[in-house]
Image (cartoon, rainbow, N blue to C red):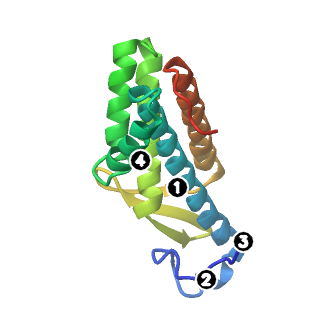
Amino acid sequence: MKLIHAPVSPGLRFGHASEALRETPAEIQRAQENRGRIIESALALEKRLGTLLASYFFPTATDRREIFTSLVLNSDWCSFASKRKLLKNLVNQHDWLTGEDKNDFDCLLRDIMSYRNAFTHGTLACAEGRVLLSFFEGGPQERELNDAFLEEIERKLCAAHDGIFALSAKANAHTVP
């Protein structure tokens, strides 16, 4: 398969023109690859969440499940946040999670949405040997893409995927691995 060559990261900027020469291409490439992986993992999580919801509402009627998925869950007005709210209502109604686990999982999904939005709409910048992500969430924000922050994101993405699988089992819904 061909790897396309098209403009990417119009928001990638450097502190000074000469600083671009000091930054290693590998560091910049890793930041862009991590950006893509975070966005892709969040998209996969949203799709698995949609599969759980569709299977819950249409456990045996696969034709209706497909219609519901294409017309409702995949529509532009059924956002990740909307799917999260639907799931939260089902979790509450069926006690699939209780106590702090319920709140923790909802916060985890909210964090994933936040990361996805920050990496999708934010700007990567190289300054003083650091890679920074600038984004807007309640106000202008800036985070350094250091190992600790990336490990936090990785841990939360894995926990969210595991949580969706666990909830799918409780709901007798089957998500794609």
The disc, 4 or 2, on the residue closer to the chain's N-terminal end is 2
The residue tagged 3 is 26
Q: Nearer the viewer, mark 3 or mark 2?
A: 2
Label 3: how many Cα within 10 Å (few below 14, some 14–19, many 20+): few
The disc, 4 or 3, on the residue closer to the chain's N-terminal end is 3
The disc, 3 or 2, on the residue closer to the chain's N-terminal end is 2
The residue tagged 1 is 39
SS at mark 1? Answer: helix
Q: Nearer the viewer, mark 4 or mark 1?
A: 1
Q: Is residue 85 above or below residue 6?
A: above
| Residue found at the far bottom of this picture | 17
Disc 4 to disc 1, C-alpha distance? 11 Å
Name the kind of residue labelled 4 in the image: Ser
Q: Nearer the viewer, mark 4 or mark 2?
A: 2
Name the kind of residue labelled 1 in the image: Ile
The residue tagged 2 is 5
The residue sitting at 63% across, 63% down in the picture is 33
Name the kind of residue labelled 2 in the image: His
The disc, 4 or 1, on the residue closer to the chain's N-terminal end is 1
The residue sitting at 43% across, 43% down in the picture is 66
Occupied quadrant, residue 161:
top right
Looking at this view, is 80 or 101 the one in front? 80
Disc 3 to disc 1, C-alpha distance? 20 Å
Occupied quadrant, residue 151:
top right
